[in-house]
Image (cartoon, rainbow, N blue to C red):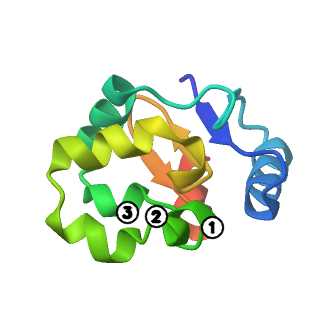
Amino acid sequence: MKNLFVWYPKCSTCQKAKKWLEANDISFEEQHIVEETPSKEELEKWIRQSGLEIKKFFNTSGLKYKELNLKEKLPNMSDTEKIELLASNGMLIKRPLLINDKVILVGFKEKEWENLK
């Protein structure tokens, strides 16, 4: 099973998640969330596959999120607009993401990630 690890190297949570993957011998391919921001099509597929609401994919504690006042704006945006916004800037996407054929994990919660083993 191929795992895609979408992360931002300067993010401490992402670093913890990467160490956890390595410690648990889980192989993965890395994708830098800013240098290779996921496309609109990738995000649509991942959101659909995850079964989560689109808002779960937003990095609500990020500076860009606050700068754009998204807490106020998101409720009035269409799903298409939200996905286009996510695809426009990797810093808006909650990280890390772990993606494979069976699961999409958003953020690093060790209990959720335990299921990968």
- Residue, disc 2: 68
Relative depth, front residue between 100 and 45: 45
Q: What residue sits 74% from the left and 54% below the top?
A: 14
Residue 82 percent location from the top left of the image: 28, 49
The type of residue carrying mark 1 is Leu
- Mark sitting earlier along the chain (2/1): 1
The type of residue carrying mark 2 is Leu
- Residue, disc 3: 56
Q: What residue sits 27% from the left and 65% below the top?
A: 74
Mark 1 and mark 3: span between their CA atoms?
A: 16 Å
Residue 101 percent location from the top left of the image: 40, 28
Residue 47's place in the image compared with 57, above or below, is above
Judged by depth in the image, the label closer to the viewer, 3 or 2, is: 2
Q: What residue sits 38% from the left and 36% below the top?
A: 102
Mark 2 and mark 1: span between their CA atoms?
A: 9 Å
Total labels: the figure holds 3
- Residue, disc 1: 63
Q: What residue sits 49% from the left and 30% below the top?
A: 38
Relative depth, front residue between 102 and 58: 58
Residue 79 left/right relative to 58:
left
